Image: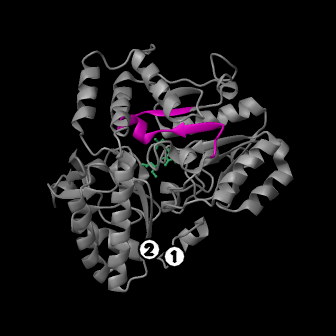
């Protein structure tokens, strides 16, 4: 039994399935999850000392690579002045000003400690602002584990075939209208039926929790015009895509302005930071300005915010996103070419620093098309690559992430190893 095996066995005695978040448990791909001991740049080392090229990067936050010296120094400096006060600090203003500057749709923003808190708060705010009870979400999208959102959700819920969680009372689930992604007719039919009851739409404007699925411009625009027509709130959940696919997120990439945006991951740089913000008239409904309550002991935590600010500063380097997108595209093009040489039905897609791998003949544009991909071949490929020292997301229903620290040699090594893995897939 290796040390990694021992840790997994020990962890299961006191932690459900040995993990603090389900997707880490390898239940979908099988085998034993790797316990990481340290990360540096594009690499992570497991408990058996094996170096892995890491394309999960903590599910998006590690956009500048693990343990970047600027980020570590910012955390160390902040920590020496105390970890948390439960009182406002200047660094929170700096974060809010940065988010407002980089995402023009945000006029007021509140910091929280996770993406789930951000989306839960945004939903409550949409309902409080409109006085309406229902929310529209899309099949395969994951917005954290808030009750209203665990209805036909993606990510770990989809991975384990439980897109709608136990423990969510029907009275709550019935207030969530679930529609197919990228389907304008279904959207228009839903609003024809009950626009008067719909507080808002929450959407992953580029989906990353049913693997990577890119919206049609027509459909994303229809979300905006439909909300305008019916006075519903349009929430872009950019927890994953914010500062990942473009300097100004999907809203910058497509030029479509949401009423509210939720953020997480990159804005914490690996530390617990989330945020929700947007139109001033909506955000002014949040306590203590307005009647919609929302709070958090560690919201805006100065040490976590310091990590996020240092990370965001690094993403403002000239050409940062062009280089990141080029590297990511080189990876996906290289993998697709290797699969073609091996005669394997495989394709890949990339947007900015985010990518999707699909064992299918064409890139999926909907939840149904993702579900038709060959999951078993993905699982075999996943393990062949893991054994070769390359760590992709342990699920066929997750997107992957490249960091600024991944070098051309890391991409080339990954493609070389994939050539062999495809041969055996
Ligand atoms: P957290 O509460 O996990 O910080 O954020 C929830 C969330 C909200 N919105 C989007 C678009 C998200 O992708 C997420 C979290 N993403 C998953 C990865 N697919 C987190 C990984 C996990 O659950 O362990």
Please name the residue that numbered disc 1 is placed on: 362
Which element type, helix, strand or loop, lies under badge 1? Answer: loop
Q: Nearer the viewer, residue 312 or 387?
A: 312
Q: Nearer the viewer, residue 252 or 228?
A: 252
Q: Nearer the viewer, residue 315 or 24?
A: 315
Which element type, helix, strand or loop, lies under badge 2? Answer: strand
- As drawn, the residue found furthest toward the bottom would be 343
Q: Is residue 271 left or right of residue 246?
A: left
User: Is 146 above or below relative to 130?
Assistant: below
- Ligand 1 contact, mark 2 (Cβ < 8 Å): no
Whether residue 77 appears in this view of the structure is yes
Whether residue 393 appears in this view of the structure is no
User: Is 126 above or below relative to 209?
Assistant: above
Residue at figure coordinates x 63%, y 52% from the top left: 151
The magenta stretch spans residue 254: no
Q: Is residue 227 left or right of residue 118?
A: right
Residues in magenta?
Answer: 256-276
Mark 2: few/some/many CA within 10 Å (<14, 14-19, 20+): many
User: Is 422 above or below relative to 83?
Assistant: below
Please name the residue that numbered disc 2 is placed on: 347
Quadrant of residue 406 within the rendered picture: bottom left
- As drawn, the residue found furthest toward the front would be 318
Q: Is residue 150 left or right of residue 14?
A: right
Quadrant of residue 312 within the rendered picture: top left
Q: Earlier in the sequence, mark 2 or mark 1?
A: 2
The magenta stretch spans residue 258: yes
User: Is 80 above or below relative to 22?
Assistant: above
**Quadrant of the image for the C terminus?**
bottom left
Residue at figure coordinates x 81%, y 43% from the top left: 230
Horizontal and vertical percent for residue 205?
Answer: 58, 51
Q: Do the CB atoms of the residues marked 2 and 1 lie less than 8 Å apart?
A: yes
């Amino acid at each position: 039994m290796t040390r990694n095996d021992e840790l997994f066995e020990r962890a299961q005695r006191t932690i459900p399935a040995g993990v603090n978040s389900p997707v880490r448990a390898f239940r979908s791909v099988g085998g034993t999850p790797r316990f990481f001991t340290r990360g540096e740049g594009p690499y992570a080392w497991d408990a058996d000392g094996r170096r892995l090229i890491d394309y999960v990067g903590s599910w998006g936050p590690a956009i500048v690579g693990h343990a970047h010296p600027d980020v570590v120094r910012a955390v160390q400096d902040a920590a020496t002045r105390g970890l948390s006060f439960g009182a406002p600090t200047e660094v929170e203003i700096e974060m809010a000003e940065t988010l407002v500057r980089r995402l023009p749709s945000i006029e007021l923003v509140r910091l929280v400690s996770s993406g789930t808190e951000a989306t839960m708060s945004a939903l409550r705010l949409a309902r409080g602002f409109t006085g309406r009870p229902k929310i529209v979400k899309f099949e395969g999208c994951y917005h954290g584990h808030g009750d209203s959102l665990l209805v036909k959700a993606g990510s770990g819920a989809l991975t384990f075939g439980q897109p709608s969680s136990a423990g969510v009372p029907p009275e709550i689930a019935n207030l969530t209208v679930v529609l197919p992604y990228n389907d304008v007719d279904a959207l228009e039919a839903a609003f024809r039926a009950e626009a008067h009851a719909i507080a808002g739409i929450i959407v992953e404007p580029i989906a990353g929790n049913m693997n990577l699925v890119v919206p049609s411009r027509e459909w994303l625009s229809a979300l905006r015009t439909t909300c305008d027509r019916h006075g519903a709130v349009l929430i872009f959940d950019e927890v994953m895509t914010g500062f990942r696919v473009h300097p100004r997120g999907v809203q910058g990439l497509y030029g479509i302005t949401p009423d509210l945006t939720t953020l997480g991951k990159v804005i914490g740089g690996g530390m617990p930071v989330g945020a929700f913000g947007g139109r001033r008239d909506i955000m002014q409904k949040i306590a203590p300005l307005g009647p919609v309550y929302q709070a958090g002991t560690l919201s805006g935590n100065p040490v976590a915010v310091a990590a996020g600010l240092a990370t965001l500063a690094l993403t403002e380097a000239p050409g940062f996103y062009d280089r990141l997108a080029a590297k990511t595209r080189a990876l996906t093009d290289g993998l697709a070419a290797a699969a073609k040489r091996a005669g394997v039905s495989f394709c890949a897609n990339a947007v900015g620093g985010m990518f999707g791998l699909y064992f299918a003949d064409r890139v999926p544009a909907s939840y149904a098309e993702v579900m038709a991909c060959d999951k078993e071949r993905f699982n075999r490929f996943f393990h062949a690559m893991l054994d070769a020292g390359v760590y992709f997301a342990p699920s066929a229903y997750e997107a992957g992430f490249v960091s600024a620290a991944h070098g051309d040699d890391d991409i080339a090594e990954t493609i070389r190893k994939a050539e062999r893995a495809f041969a055996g897939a």
